[in-house]
Image (tube, rainbow, N blue to C red):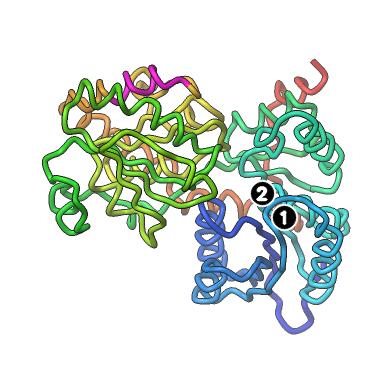
Amino acid sequence: MHQSTTDPRPRVLHLTQPVEGGVARVLADLTRAQLAAGLGVTVACPDSGLSDILRQLGADVRPWQATRAPGPSLTGEVRRLARLVEDVRPDLVHAHSAKAGLAGRIAVRGRIPTVFQPHAWSFEAVGGATAALALKWERFGARWAHRTVCVSEAECRTGLRAGIDARWTVVPNGIDTDRFRPAAAGTVRAALGTDVDPRAPLVVCVGRLCRQKGQDVLLAAWTSVVRRVPGARLVLVGDGPDRERLRGPEPVLFAGAVADPVPWYQAADVVVLPSRWEGMALAPLEAMACGRPVVATDVDGARESLPPGHAPHCLVPAEDPPALADALTALLLDPPLRERLGHEGRRHVRAAHDVRHAAGAMEDVYHALLGTGTPAPAAPTEYRESIHS
């Protein structure tokens, strides 16, 4: 452990690329909580809106030029990161997502206590030879992480089934339940100033427009929904590489990227996340905190994020437009069920997914690695044994 000679606080260096979406929101919340707890927090990331938010919170932000995907620039990215680590001299490095996890672990190579948080596995995001290469790296790179933190038990099991021999801890995602809270849908819709009729059945999808999030599957399902629920509207909130490719039946509104998704959750009758893979997505937690029912695909973390008893109404197979259409239609046509699920979801998120719980659990991981607290538990025995089964 390397303590600064001028600052007695443990110094954490977070590394992140991407700088948008759920990973950025998790990191911003974690930074806010860690600064409040008295840690010295430095974040290395590309210049972005996230950089501005972190500086406003009081973090020491260091520009790290890095592309989102691995490529020819990796060697230079690792070299720049190694110089940055030497300059910051952190007590602990916390690398977020695949790209920062790759560059960070190569740069540090276990010489400093290192936490790797995949936020969904890289080998699930690609196919063919690229997936095989990503998995080979994750198996090798696990030796350079003192702890691999998964956001769901399912994400942990996926890593174990893939043969990644890591030291595991599960810290479920949390959200700010004071910021994400219920409001009257009609009032919020009027304030948004869109062309959405305040009385129309409204489905909202919040997420980056990319293959992972499955908006193409949702658009394929939407024709069936509108046929059975006349006047229903769909809003896609977010931007991304698939923006120009996505086309759907009318009426679909592309709202683009927004600074604050809260009003869109509050405006919805149902929130949907048709992802192909996740670790544990924030959007369902945020929507439930706003008192809205959620339809999600049964991928890593989704079942764990829902309250008991919600799966029959709210979980559908991935890449299954008919099943997705059936679930959305059933909820749109049943207002009492929507209201019950919304109330139960809000209570569940406040009890199990408050950001303060998540930040405290991560602090326990840090204390264990720095030798300043009770060691965090390893993954359950049956998980560890499944590596060899």
| Residue at the far left in the pictured view | 199
Label 2, residues with CA under 10 Å away: few <14, some 14-19, many ≥20: many
Is 327 rendered above or below residue 373? above
Image quadrant where residue 257 sits: bottom left
Give the structural element (helix, strand or loop) at label 1. helix
Question: Residue 47 at what x, y percent from top left?
Answer: 61, 71
Is 210 rendered above or below residue 331? below
Q: Residue at 80% across / 63% down in the picture?
A: 77
Is 205 rendered above or below residue 93? above
Give the structural element (helix, strand or loop) at label 2. helix
The residue wearing badge 1 is: 100
Quadrant location of the N terminus in the rendered image:
bottom right
Q: Main secondary structure of the magenta part?
A: helix
In the drawing, does residue 127 fall left or right of residue 202? right
Q: Tell me, yes or no, whether the highlighted magenta stretch contains residue 252.
A: no
Q: Are marks 1 and 2 in contact (CB under 8 Å)?
A: yes
Q: Residue at 48% across / 31% down in the picture?
A: 302
In the drawing, does residue 103 fall left or right of residue 173? right
In the drawing, does residue 308 fall left or right of residue 118? left
The residue wearing badge 2 is: 97
Magenta-tinted stretch: 320-328
